[in-house]
């Protein structure tokens, strides 16, 4: 009987993930590790940092290898990976390569956050880790803080957030919290949500993404939870950045979620600028798995342009 119970599946998203009702988890994506490297032959350098020793919260920091050692300041991007809260890592090849490409294309400093994953660490732990990482980044704005790259090269008047899929949802929640609580003198300029996941009251809850939310956040009230439903989020009108870019894909099952966020934000009373761009003929997070295709390169350039708009005037 115990053996039968152990094989009962709680959630699966094949070929990437399976969780069993006895607590066992099998991850088939995001488990490989690309080691950090400081290599002048590459167009970027990376290192891994511990943010909170007690919880194991870590991040990977990226800088362009061409950066001037004489204190050249660059925009700072904080990146939150996708994976439904239960898979993915900034250290795996998929996300390492994506953020590295962004750093090279946009000429920025980036911090890719390794928040803890459900179901071992159920939501809201991912949100709390993501906020702790953002606060750690902003702690460098006065020239102090533990990381030399951020101290010497981060321009904290040009800080951006970005993330894909559920990472896009995290981006919204971080920008919303920043709008309420502030970021201690740091200017959060923009937020980029790539193929973001959001829920709606009328959602049937039968899609993998909807079932993932219920699975990873067992204490949620459902799809009226303001963390997952922007229409229920009282913080939306005071979003803590001045511009938002939403990227959607034509054949993405979550496309309507991105459109929903776009329309809801426009109606919220928020005074910033919101833009939306659609990749025709493409599916969910296609750019991560086909990074060299024409549409993926266009997406990368659009994200870089979003970060660099107005750079000359700063």
Image (cartoon, rainbow, N blue to C red):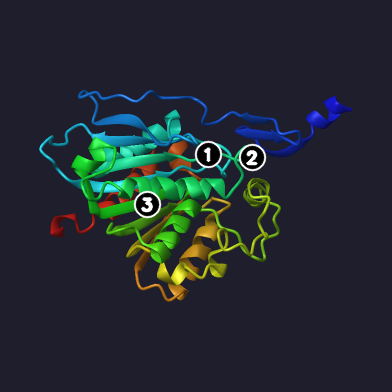
Q: Which residue is mark 1?
A: 116
Image location (x, y in percent) of residue 37: 30, 24
Dot 3 falls on a residue whose secondary structure is: strand
Dot 1 falls on a residue whose secondary structure is: loop
Apparent side of residue 73 relative to residue 115 in the rendered image (left or right):
left
Q: Which residue is mark 3?
A: 161
Dot 2 falls on a residue whose secondary structure is: loop
Q: Which residue is mark 2?
A: 119
Apparent side of residue 69 relative to residue 258 in the rendered image (left or right):
left
Apparent side of residue 100 relative to residue 267 in the rendered image (left or right):
left
- Please identify, in this view, whether the residue under mark 3 or under mark 2 is nearer the observer: 2
Q: Quadrant of the N terminus?
A: top right
Residue sitting farthest toward the right: 1
Residue displayed at 43% across by 29% down:
93
User: Of marks 3 and 2, which one's residue comes earlier in the chain?
Assistant: 2
Which is nearer the eye, 119 or 191?
119
Residue sitting farthest toward the front: 54
> Whole-Å distance between the Cαs marked 1 and 3?
18 Å
Residue displayed at 40% across by 60% down:
178
């Amino acid at each position: 009987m115990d053996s039968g119970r152990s094989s009962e599946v709680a959630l699966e998203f094949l070929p990437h993930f399976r969780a069993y009702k006895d607590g066992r988890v099998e991850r088939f994506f995001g488990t490989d590790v690309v080691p950090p490297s400081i290599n002048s032959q590459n167009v970027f350098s990376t290192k891994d940092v511990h943010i909170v020793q007690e919880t194991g919260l870590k991040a990977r920091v990226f800088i362009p290898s061409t950066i001037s050692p004489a204190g050249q300041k660059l925009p700072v991007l904080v990146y939150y990976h996708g994976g439904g809260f239960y898979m993915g890592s900034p250290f795996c090849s998929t996300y390492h390569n994506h953020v590295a490409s962004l750093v090279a294309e946009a000429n920025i400093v980036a911090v890719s956050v390794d928040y803890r994953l459900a179901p071992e660490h159920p939501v809201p732990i991912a949100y709390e880790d993501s906020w702790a990482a953002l606060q750690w980044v902003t702690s460098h704005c006065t020239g102090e803080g533990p990381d030399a790259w951020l101290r010497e090269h981060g321009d904290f008047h040009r800080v951006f957030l970005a993330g894909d899929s559920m990472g896009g949802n995290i981006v919204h929640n971080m920008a919303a919290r920043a709008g309420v609580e502030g970021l201690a003198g740091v200017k959060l300029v923009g937020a980029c949500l790539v193929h973001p996941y959001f829920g709606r009251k009328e959602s049937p809850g039968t899609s993998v993404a909807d079932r993932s939310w219920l699975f990873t956040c067992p204490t949620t009230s459902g799809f009226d939870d303001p963390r997952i439903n922007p229409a229920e989020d009282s913080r939306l009108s005071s979003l803590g950045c001045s511009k938002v870019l939403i990227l959607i894909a034509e054949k993405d099952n979550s496309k309507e979620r991105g459109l929903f966020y776009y329309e809801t934000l426009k109606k919220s009373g928020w005074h910033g600028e919101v833009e939306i761009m659609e990749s025709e003929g493409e599916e969910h997070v296609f750019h991560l798995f086909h990074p060299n295709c024409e549409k993926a390169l266009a997406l990368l350039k659009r994200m870089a342009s979003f970060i660099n708009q107005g750079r000359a005037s700063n």
